[in-house]
Amino acid sequence: MKRSQKILSLAYIYFILLLMYAPILVIIIFSFTTSTNIGMWNGFSFELYIKLFKHKDIMRALKNTLIIAISSSLISTLLGTLGAVGVYYSKRRTRKVFETVNEIPVVNAEVVVAISLAILFRLGVQLLAKVGIAAESPSFGTLLIGHIVLSIAFVYLSVRPKLYQMDPSDYEAALDLGAKPLQALLKIVLPAIMPGIIAGFMLAFTLSLDDFVITNFLRVQSFDTLSTYVQGVIVKSSIPAELRALTTLIFLVTLAIILLASYKNEKKTHRKQSKRLLMRGGKK
């Protein structure tokens, strides 16, 4: 009975994984052929990858996507980390208030955030116009702020657990030994929470990379990201075959980063286990 349950549970897991990754696998396979439609094989070729880097519209959309994703991720990581550290060292009541407020963007519908920001920026432009200051909405600035608002809460949630795992006496010991608060923060707190900061940056980058709703509401019409470019192309005609090559490259880069991070974590865990065994052997 237990064996049959185990087989059924494994079959269910593999079935779900198949549903998740089968479409990506199909795209990867047909990125190595020149056929316009998926399902038709015209022989193995790297022509789509060559055409991809010559496609001006796709390259411009990719460039814009990377610019907004990197910029918003860096700012979100900085603000989210500072916010997490500040809330961690705040009083208990203040901490509860900020943690509750931080959860609102996470559970709130993205379209609500996008519409609210669009209305807010329009009102801001009107108010600035009344005092003689010229401003535009939408613009690159409004889009950047929108992506920051989208991802900053997730950075906070990535950094917060690392702060609670940190030994608070280390920071106090650094202050007792003569270090200034900023020095203690940079040399004690930041190294301890660095895995959470890196995870927060990667999460913010991913959220910004594939965002469509906020981008569509807050961008200038001439500023296309990959998501808005694909949506615009689908309305007019079929999806360019070169996007299959781009999808494959993005997937392979993501897979490489995950495997590298997993390898480093395993290596770090192995080192910790080796140290524990050595310490136990020394005690004996």
Image (tube, rainbow, N blue to C red):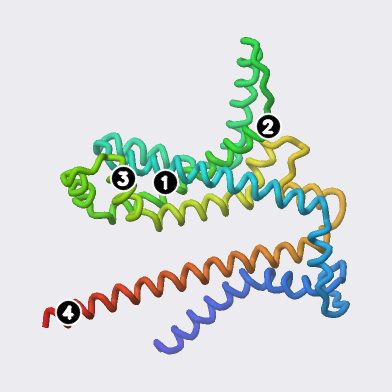
Q: Nearer the viewer, mark 3 or mark 4?
A: 3
Q: Eyeballing the image, is 99 above or below 22?
A: above
Percent across and percent down for residue 259 are 52, 71
Check contact, mark 3 vs mark 4: CB within 8 A.
no
Q: Residue at x 25, y 75 (%)?
A: 275
- Kind of element beneath mark 1: helix
Q: Which mark is residue 280?
A: 4
Q: Residue at x 80, y 61 (%)?
A: 52
Percent across and percent down for residue 16 are 57, 72
Q: Residue at x 81, y 50 (%)?
A: 57
Q: Which residue does the numbered mark 2 point to in the structure image?
A: 139
Q: Amino acid at mark 3?
A: Leu
- Kind of element beneath mark 3: helix
Q: Which mark is residue 185?
A: 3
Q: Which mark is residue 156?
A: 1
How far is mark 1 from mark 3, CA to CA? 17 Å
Left or right: residue 196 compared with residue 94:
right
Check contact, mark 1 vs mark 3: CB within 8 A.
no
Q: Amino acid at mark 1?
A: Tyr
Q: Amino acid at mark 4?
A: Arg
The answer to whether residue 112 shows anywhere in this view is no
- Label 3 neighbourhood size at 10 Å, few (<14), some (14-19), many (20+)? some
Instruction: Tell me which corner region of the image, top left, top right, bottom left or bottom right, holds residue 223.
Output: top right
Name which of mark 3 and mark 4 comes first in the sequence.
3
